[in-house]
Image (cartoon, rainbow, N blue to C red):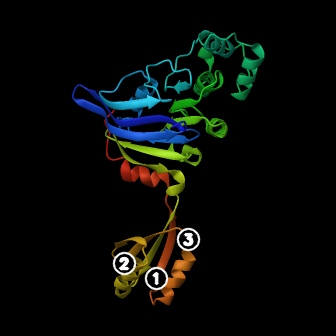
Amino acid sequence: MDNVVIETNALTKAYKNTIAINNISLSVTRGTVVGLLGKNGAGKTTLNKLITGLIFPTHGSIKVFDTIPKGGEKRLGFLSENIALYPNLTARENLEIVFLQEGVLPKREQISQILKTVSIKDTKKKVRDFSLGMKRRLQIAMTVLANERELFILDEPTNGLDVDGVFWLKELINNLKYQGKTILLSSHSILELEDILTDYLIFNKGRISDKGRLDKINGKVLHIEILANDIDRARAFLEKNGFLFRVDGSTMSITIQDNYKSLLKVLYEEGIFPISYYINKKSLVDKFHQFAGDNNDDK
């Protein structure tokens, strides 16, 4: 399918006695921003390397732009955690090298526009004297802005960025999405980047433990405390009407999509009288804590 950018089938990658990626099947479509989430060693970096063709599967298959990745894909830009910079050169000179590596004669005006976009104003300073945040901005410029790409893999892109830098990065990613680009984000900064994601994949010990679209999880949960003699009546009513709920003692947690006041009104009409209630909006953080598991390995 033309709209599918990445497709895997039972993808597995093993290193001796360690299975880094275990039987993963997924499909990433054009124009999406996908968050790859998981604790250290969960498999995110291994998947990124398989996509870029830096390593190859042990079992199963992977296709990027409908071809088996072998490295050097011109439509793919990969921002690693520690992309190489030339410390004794200026930002302009670093960008010129990127253009030349692509076989393109660098244009001064184009490089000036890129530097302006990433807010690098001192064009004479050597990169070795840059702050960590400015180095990250330059790395992003070299990966994302210096050449035309259709797919971007950004591994921990917020490293070193201050609050303004994170806002700038989010605006850049949103612009790429509106242009129809596809972005894979690996990050520990879930709260910082959640609002720009369209989809998510949660990894746990080499497997995808949960995946989906962001707009499908941003529902609300109504927590109500009910009199003990009303619990059974409330349970029967909610089951009959197809509500998802959980009971913990005298408290019921009900997943709702509509106005919670309407549900409270119906409960009152049924003779079920909550003592107290509060609303909790579900988020990607909740999903992460639920599905990321207790995986503290760093492999």
Picture coordinates of residue 33 (x, y %)? 55, 41
Mark 2 element type = loop
Picture coordinates of residue 42 (x, y %)? 35, 38
**Is residue 282 in view from this perspective?**
yes
Mark 3 sits on what residue? Answer: 258
Mark 2 sits on what residue? Answer: 250
- Left or right placement of residue 36 versus residue 104 in this view: left
Instruction: Tell me the quarter of the picture where residue 144 sits.
Output: top right
Looking at this view, is 265 or 168 the one in front? 265
Question: Who's the residue at 36% across and 37% down the image?
Answer: 9
Marks 1, 3: nearer the viewer: 3
Query: Pointers 1 and 2 in contact (CB under 8 A)?
Result: yes
Question: Who's the residue at 49% across and 39% down the image?
Answer: 28
Residues under labels 2 and 3: Cα distance?
23 Å
Q: Quadrant of the C terminus?
A: top left
Give the mark nearest the N terminus, 1 or 3.
3
Amino acid type assigned to the residue bearing label 1 in the image:
Ile
Give the mark nearest the N terminus, 2 or 3.
2
Residues under labels 1 and 2: Cα distance?
10 Å
Amino acid type assigned to the residue bearing label 2 in the image:
Ser
Amino acid type assigned to the residue bearing label 3 in the image:
Asp
Residues under labels 1 and 3: Cα distance?
21 Å
Give the mark nearest the N terminus, 1 or 2.
2
How many numbered marks does the figure carry?
3
Mark 3 element type = loop
Mark 1 sits on what residue? Answer: 275
